[in-house]
Image (cartoon, helix red, strand yellow):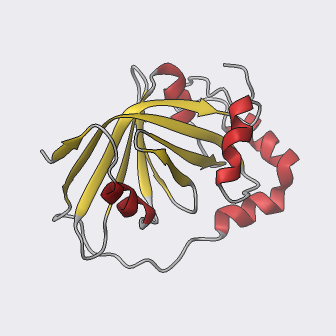
Amino acid sequence: MGDRFERLSEKHIDFISRQHMFFVGTAGSEGFVNVSPKGMDTFRVLNDTNVVWLNLTGSGNETAAHVLESKRMTLMFCSFDKHPIILRLYGNASVIHPRDQKWDELIGLFPEYLGSRQIFELNLELVLASCGYGVPYYELKGERPTLAKWADSKGIDDIKKYWEERNMESLNKKPTGITGDA
C-alpha cells in the first residue's frame, strides 16, 4: 500500500529533483486511459501541494483532452538506481495555454523550448511513496535531442499548423482546447 502523505516533504522534493523521467496518467469519463512518459527539464515543484510541468508538442494531446473532461491526474516518479522508491502524486489538474494569463507567470520557470504547448498545474490531494523493489536498474545515457531539434526545424508557425492537424482531438475524438476551441 505504501506510505500516504497530504503534501510533499523535503525528502520527496529532493527525490523528484534527481529524477530524469516521470509518467503522467489521465483518463476521461470513458475511452482510453493515457499514460505518457515525460523527460527533459519540464517539471517544477511550486510548493508542498502544487507542481507544474511543461508539455511539449508531440504526436498526440491526450492529457489536455482528459483534463478538460476530468481534472484527475496522477504523476509517477520511480527510481532506477540504488534507492528503490516509487512516488505517486494524485490530484486535480488544470491546463494552461500560451494564450492564458497564467502562462506568463509560469513559463519562465522552464528553459525555452520552441515546441511548448501547455503547462499543467497539479494541486495535490495525495502523495504515495512505496517500494520500488520490482523496478529494474537503468542507467541514464542522456536526454534525446530529437524533439527539440524537430521543433526548432519547424519554427513556431509550422508547429501551430501541426497542432491544428494532429493535436486538436484525443484518440476518442474529444477536443483538446489547443487552439481555444474547446
Q: Position of residue 63 (x, y in %)?
A: 52, 36
Q: Position of residue 130 (x, y in %)?
A: 19, 53
Say if residue 34 shows up in the picture: no
Q: Name the foreground residue: 68 vs 49.
A: 49
If the image is split into quadrants, where does the C terminus sit?
A: top right
Q: Name the foreground residue: 142 vs 120.
A: 120
Residue at 70% across / 40% down in the picture? 105
Please identify the quarter of the rendering in which residue 71 is found. Answer: top left
Q: Position of residue 2 (x, y in %)?
A: 15, 48
Q: Name the foreground residue: 173 vs 163.
A: 163
Residue at 66% across / 37% down in the picture? 167
Left or right relative to 14: residue 6: left
Residue at 42% across / 55% down in the picture? 22
Please identify the quarter of the rendering in which residue 165 is found. Answer: top right
Residue at 26% across / 56% down in the picture? 86
Say if residue 180 shows up in the picture: yes
Q: Residue furthest left?
A: 1
Relative to 21, does residue 181 appear above or below in the rendering? above
If the image is split into quadrants, where does the N terminus sit?
A: top left
Q: Position of residue 75 (x, y in %)?
A: 39, 45
Relative to 93, does residue 154 appear above or below in the rendering? below
Left or right relative to 143: residue 160: right
